[in-house]
Image (tube, rainbow, N blue to C red):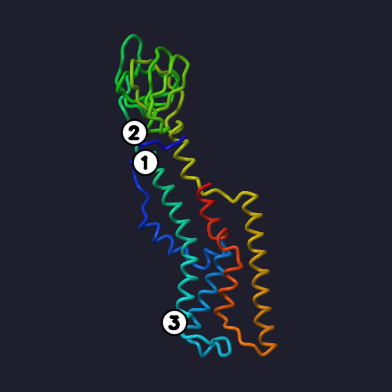
């Protein structure tokens, strides 16, 4: 079931331009240190390879390729890190778009409040739990409530994505923001302003970036541990080659390290945390 419905699909779209800017900001090493230590190692590798291309003389004995080779390797490493930050930024942009789409449903509508034997038109924001309102075909249900009298088909497509109206009768729960498709019903309001089902959905989406679960913390520790092991192994290759009088290009060794590291999981883990 799509909790955002067809209305939300046609509503605000993710701001990919802002996501692109956010992804560039997230390349900050301090951010990666806190959020994605695996990608921080990749970014450090990018900085080293870029320095090798800009000043090969500073890496005597570790450089045996043309400058363009190092620039290409540096570009690939930077794209690897950027893919991680961009996926996280897009997840955040989609979350903001969902909130905007839900807010378009949270509108103030006129409600026909039953007072004695008459009906009084009041804005839905002034309704309190226990108030009874009438909603007829073509009208929006002003707030979450329970049907007190009558039966009707309710169009909930903007909330659930279901194209077929739902049949509701006395005692059934109805959601504010949905539309009465047929007949007329009396509804007892049960939700306070700001505490409706729609408000809960907005709060849920806004707080989608939650603290890491125990499983995610364990996975992060595992990824960092594996990365540390591979760093030690690749460093050992460098010292062993030097001891044997062999020449190993540092850029190739860094590329090997990145290939061995769990960069796919480490890069997408922040986006998974955002998506929940």
The front one of 8 and 115 is 8
In the depicted structure, whether residue 230 falls above or below residue 220: below
Sequence-first disc among 2 and 1:
1
Q: Residue at x 46, y 37 (%)?
A: 201
- List the residue tagged with mark 2: 107
The front one of 248 and 167 is 248
- List the residue tagged with mark 1: 9
In the depicted structure, whether residue 87 falls above or below residue 195: below
Regarding mark 3 in the picture, which secondary structure is present there?
Answer: helix
Mark pair 3, 1: CA separation: 45 Å
The label on residue 68 is 3
Mark 3 vs mark 1: give the one in front. Answer: 3
Mark pair 2, 1: CA separation: 18 Å
Mark 1: give few (<14), some (14-19) or many (20+) Cα within 10 Å.
some
The front one of 218 and 192 is 218
Mark 3: give few (<14), some (14-19) or many (20+) Cα within 10 Å.
few
Mark 2 vs mark 1: give the one in front. Answer: 1
- Tell me whether the residue at label 3 lies in contact with that at label 2, contact meaning CB atoms closer than 8 angstroms: no
Q: Is residue 150 left or right of residue 257?
A: left
Q: Residue at x 37, y 41 (%)?
A: 9
Regarding mark 1 in the picture, which secondary structure is present there?
Answer: helix
- Tell me whether the residue at label 2 lies in contact with that at label 1, contact meaning CB atoms closer than 8 angstroms: no
Sequence-first disc among 3 and 1:
1
């Amino acid at each position: 079931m799509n909790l955002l419905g067809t209305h939300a699909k046609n509503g605000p779209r993710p701001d990919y331009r802002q996501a692109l800017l956010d992804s560039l900001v997230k390349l900050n090493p301090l951010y990666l240190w806190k959020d994605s230590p695996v990608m921080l190692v990749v970014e450090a590798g990018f900085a080293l390879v870029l320095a090798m291309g800009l000043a090969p003389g500073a890496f005597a004995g570790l450089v045996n390729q043309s400058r363009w080779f190092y620039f290409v390797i540096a570009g690939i490493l930077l794209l690897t890190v950027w893919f991680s930050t961009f996926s996280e930024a897009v997840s955040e942009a989609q979350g903001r778009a969902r909130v905007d789409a839900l807010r378009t449903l949270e509108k103030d509508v006129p409600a026909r409040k039953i007072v004695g034997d008459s009906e009084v038109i009041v804005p839905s924001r002034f309704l309190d739990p226990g108030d009874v309102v009438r909603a007829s075909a073509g009208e929006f249900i002003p707030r979450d409530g329970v049907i007190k009298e009558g039966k009707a088909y309710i169009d909930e497509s903007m909330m659930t994505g279901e194209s077929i109206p739902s049949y509701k009768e006395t005692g059934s729960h109805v959601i504010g923001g949905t539309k009465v498709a047929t007949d007329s019903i009396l509804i007892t309001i049960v939700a306070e302003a700001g505490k409706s089902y729609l408000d809960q959905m907005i709060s849920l989406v806004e707080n989608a970036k939650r603290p890491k679960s125990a499983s995610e913390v364990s996975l992060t520790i595992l990824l960092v541990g594996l990365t540390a092991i591979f760093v030690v192994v690749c460093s050992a290759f460098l010292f062993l080659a030097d001891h044997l009088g062999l020449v190993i290009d540092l850029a190739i060794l860094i590329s090997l390290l990145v290939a061995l590291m769990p960069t796919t999981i480490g890069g997408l883990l922040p986006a998974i945390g955002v998506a929940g």
